Amino acid sequence: NAGVTQTPKFRILKIGQSMTLQCTQDMNHNYMYWYRQDPGMGLKLIYYSVGAGITDKGEVPNGYNVSRSTTEDFPLRLELAAPSQTSVYFCASRRKQGAGNTIYFGEGSWLTVV
Amino acid sequence: ILNVEQSPQSLHVQEGDSTNFTCSFPSSNFYALHWYRWETAKSPEALFVMTLNGDEKKKGRISATLNTKEGYSYLYIKGSQPEDSATYLCALPDVRGSTLGRLYFGRGTQLTVWP
């Protein structure tokens, strides 16, 4: 199984540009998440989805958008990139039933906005 | 938002030392706690999922305990090795109605083991 796959791994954006971080999972997981990781701050939840067609804001949603048209895919869109969005982004997924289900992470996307 | 706190923020130990750190959380509405090991430039790796008060889990030299009544979990590493150097994260799922499905992470404890 590929697990959680996110692309690209590295990207440099100019201020004001837009881009989409792709995330796909092949485990038929209902729940999917986007986190950003800033030094000393742990993982902050940007958006999450509990199933196809359903998305909700997390702790730090401003400047981002998501969609969940299929169970497998959960892309994260950055509109009008700002230096404050320089970060490492992680996509994750888990099964719906049971709060104890293991969370599976993608390998991370390093984004720099200059 | 669930307030998940980890302490200490960082820890430096010598090879062979044993160490432990803490994850604290609200004791109400508890369902599960996850421990993750996270090395730089890699994705977090699952260590333990703990669900019952008094749970003790072990994986090699790493073990964890859970006290849901007082809202904390300890992670222990016995005889630390340089390869244990990583950030250790704990996470709690939110099971409350309007925020069901969210996962909240602590800031992590960054462990450095010196040879």
Image (spheres, coloured by chain):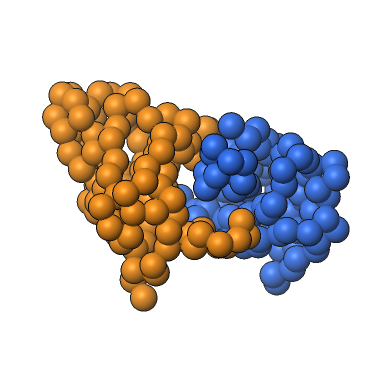
Chain colours: A orange, B blue
User: Quick check: B58 above or below B96?
Assistant: below
User: How many numbered circles are shown?
Assistant: 0
| Coordinates of residue A93 in the picture (x, y in percent) | 43, 57
User: Quick check: B29 above or below B19?
Assistant: above
Residue B59, quarter of the rendered image:
bottom right
Q: Residue furthest bottom?
A: A1
Q: Is residue A45 left or right of residue A17?
A: right
Image quadrant occupied by the C terminus of chain A? top left
Residue A28, quarter of the rendered image:
bottom left
User: Which residue does the image show at 31% across and 61% down from the upper left?
Assistant: A72
| Coordinates of residue B35 in the picture (x, y in percent) | 63, 55
| Coordinates of residue A100 in the picture (x, y in percent) | 63, 60
Q: Nearer the viewer, residue B107 or B27?
A: B27
User: Which residue does the image show at 54% across and 39% down from the upper left?
Assistant: B99
| Coordinates of residue B106 in the picture (x, y in percent) | 61, 39
Image quadrant occupied by the N terminus of chain A? bottom left
Q: Is residue B100 left or right of residue B65?
A: left
Residue A30 seen by the camera = yes
Residue A34 seen by the camera = no
User: Which residue does the image show at 71% across and 63% down from the upper left?
Assistant: B62
User: Which residue does the image show at 73% across and 58% down from the upper left?
Assistant: B51
